[in-house]
Image (tube, rainbow, N blue to C red):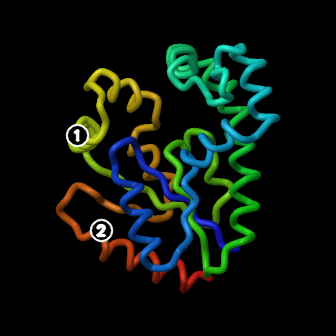
Amino acid sequence: MYKVGLTGGIGSGKSFVARVFELLGIPVYYADKRAKSLMLKDRRLKKSIKGLLGDESYHSNGRPNRAFIASKIFGDKKLLMKINALVHPAVRVDFEAWALEQDAPYVLEESALLFEIKGQVHFEDVILVIADETIRINRVLNRDKTNKKAVMSRIKQQLKDDKKIALADFIIDNNGNKSILQQVLKIHKEILKKI
């Protein structure tokens, strides 16, 4: 199966772009959603997270204590790297199994931290969605119940777009001045030619 990564910084619009690919019949694996599901259902992963962060990382009903986990990892880079070292391999295994079940010319994995975790090595191509930081911040503020300081904190944990651009095979500009559909269609056709 031909595998394509889809990434972009917070508020870039990568999930919207993923939905456009889905309209073209391309299956999309949403890595963040699947990671949350695996943290809930995968026994080994749960045990490892509890071993790293303590029993408080899960509620008594077995659901992850997201507020507690976030409070621990977002202020501690070493702890964040350790939890990523648990979650990302589980997501990789899950994605590979999912990809084998798909019946399409290629599949996409939508992942916010693709370049940050050096995940590009698992894909034939990587599509990067970019947008100016001010636009991204405003999108997140309008979408989530959060504040600018929290958004900036998340942006700082991601690579800058100029570094990502150098690593990407395709770029989608989502500043609002170019048609997303036309950009997606062009990339879709180029990927089909490669296959």
- Name the residue at 71% across, 15% down: 55
- Identify the element where label 2 is drawn: helix
Q: Which amino acid, by three-letter code, is at mark 1? A: Asn
Q: Vertical placement of 29 versus 45: above or below?
A: below
User: Image check: 152 left or right of 49?
Assistant: left
Q: Position of residue 64 (x, y in %)?
A: 62, 28
Frontmost residue, 53 versus 82: 53
Q: Which residue does the image show at 46% across and 71% down from the upper left?
A: 22
Reading the chain from its start, which is encountered first: label 1 or label 2? 1
From the viewer's perspective, is 151 left or right of 49?
A: left
Q: Amino acid at mark 2?
A: Ile
* Residue under label 1: 142
| Residue at 17% in and 62% down | 177
Q: CA–CA distance between discs 1 and 2?
A: 20 Å
Residue 173: horizontal and vertical position, in percent? 30, 59
Question: What residue is pinned by disc 2?
Answer: 180
Q: Nearer the viewer, residue 151 or 101?
A: 101
Q: Quadrant of the N terminus?
A: bottom right
Q: Quadrant of residue 176?
A: bottom left
Against 159, residue 26 (above or below) is below
Does residue 152 sit above or below 119 in this rendering? above
Compared across the picture, whether 25 is left or right of 17 comes to right
